[in-house]
């Protein structure tokens, strides 16, 4: 079942600009993860934020989590052409045993 | 190198011809999973396995079988493929029996399957 929903579905920006993607989810979570997928390739883990954390940084990535709104955002600063990819949020399903549940993704295009 | 491998990477087949997509991981992970990815639908879990000889249905198991006879291998079997199984398939693994909040899933490179 779909848990996370990313927004927007697609985003195109100029190189050097910041890119922000949002994720909303429905049920309570322990943690939320963000993954990147280059075209036709496997997903690669980017960052994990725990439910008791509000913000986390990793290099040019900044993730926020608002559990009261059941939402998270991923900010990529100073974007580069190599950041062109699809980005997915994934949540653990709370009490379920089926591991991570992924959203449909945001397709990010960085224009050179 | 720690990795998840899948074979074949590309496959075109015909309706009804049994096929197997292999998945292998060299990280001694307990948990393995299969997903399919379709435009507009994101990743949907097909089957998962928390340990050897333990498999469970995900969200879209119909038309698929899996087995987990060894820890490192988790093949996906399509006994009688149909065109609606044309998709991009990913195998993934993670360390613990149930992916904990701290567990990262490691994905294979994907298998693009076309069923004519």
Image (spheres, helix red, strand yellow):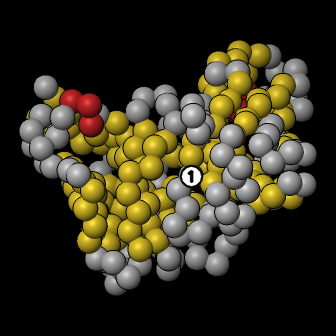
Above or below, A85 against B45 in this view is: above
Above or below, B13 against B29 in this view is: above
The quadrant the N terminus of chain B occupies is top right
Above or below, A4 against B63 in this view is: below
- Side (left or right) of A62 relative to A27: left
Q: How many marks?
A: 1
Circle 1 SS class: loop
Task: Give how far across and how far down residue B107 sits, in percent.
Answer: 57, 42
Q: Quick one: label 1, few (<14), some, or many (20+) residues within 10 Å?
A: many
- Side (left or right) of A93 relative to B8: left
Residue name at image x 55 percent, y 62 percent: B103
Quadrant position of residue B21: top right
Task: Give how far across and how far down residue B18 sits, in percent.
Answer: 88, 25
Chain of residue at mark 1: B
Task: Give how far across and how far down residue B19 sits, in percent.
Answer: 84, 25
- Name the residue tied to disc 1: B105
| Relative depth, front residue between B108 and A98 | B108
User: Is residue B35 among what the camera can see?
Assistant: no
Above or below, B38 against B83 in this view is: below
Residue name at image x 52 percent, y 36 percent: A42
| Relative depth, front residue between B36 and A55 | A55
Residue name at image x 37 percent, y 40 percent: A86
Quadrant position of residue B53: bottom right
């Amino acid at each position: 079942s779909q848990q996370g929903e990313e927004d927007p579905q697609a985003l195109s920006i100029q190189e050097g600009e910041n890119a922000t993607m949002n994720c909303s989810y429905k049920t309570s979570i322990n943690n939320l993860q963000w993954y990147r997928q280059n075209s036709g390739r496997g997903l690669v883990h980017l960052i994990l934020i725990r439910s008791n954390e509000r913000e986390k940084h990793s290099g040019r990535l900044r993730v926020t989590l608002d559990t009261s709104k059941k939402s998270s955002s991923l900010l990529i600063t100073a974007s580069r052409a190599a950041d062109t990819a699809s980005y997915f949020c994934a949540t653990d399903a709370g009490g379920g045993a089926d591991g991570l549940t992924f959203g449909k993704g945001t397709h990010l295009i960085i224009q050179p | 190198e720690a990795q998840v491998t899948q074979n074949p990477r590309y496959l075109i087949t015909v309706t009804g011809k049994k096929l197997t997509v292999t998945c292998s991981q060299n990280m001694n992970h307990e948990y393995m999973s299969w997903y399919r990815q379709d435009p507009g639908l994101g990743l949907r879990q097909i089957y998962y396995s928390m340990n050897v000889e333990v498999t469970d249905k995900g969200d879209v198991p119909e038309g698929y079988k899996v087995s987990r006879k060894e820890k490192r291998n988790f093949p996906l079997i399509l006994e009688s493929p149909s065109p609606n199984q044309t998709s991009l398939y990913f195998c993934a693994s993670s360390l613990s029996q149930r992916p904990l909040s701290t567990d990262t899933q490691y994905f294979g490179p994907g298998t693009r399957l076309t069923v004519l």
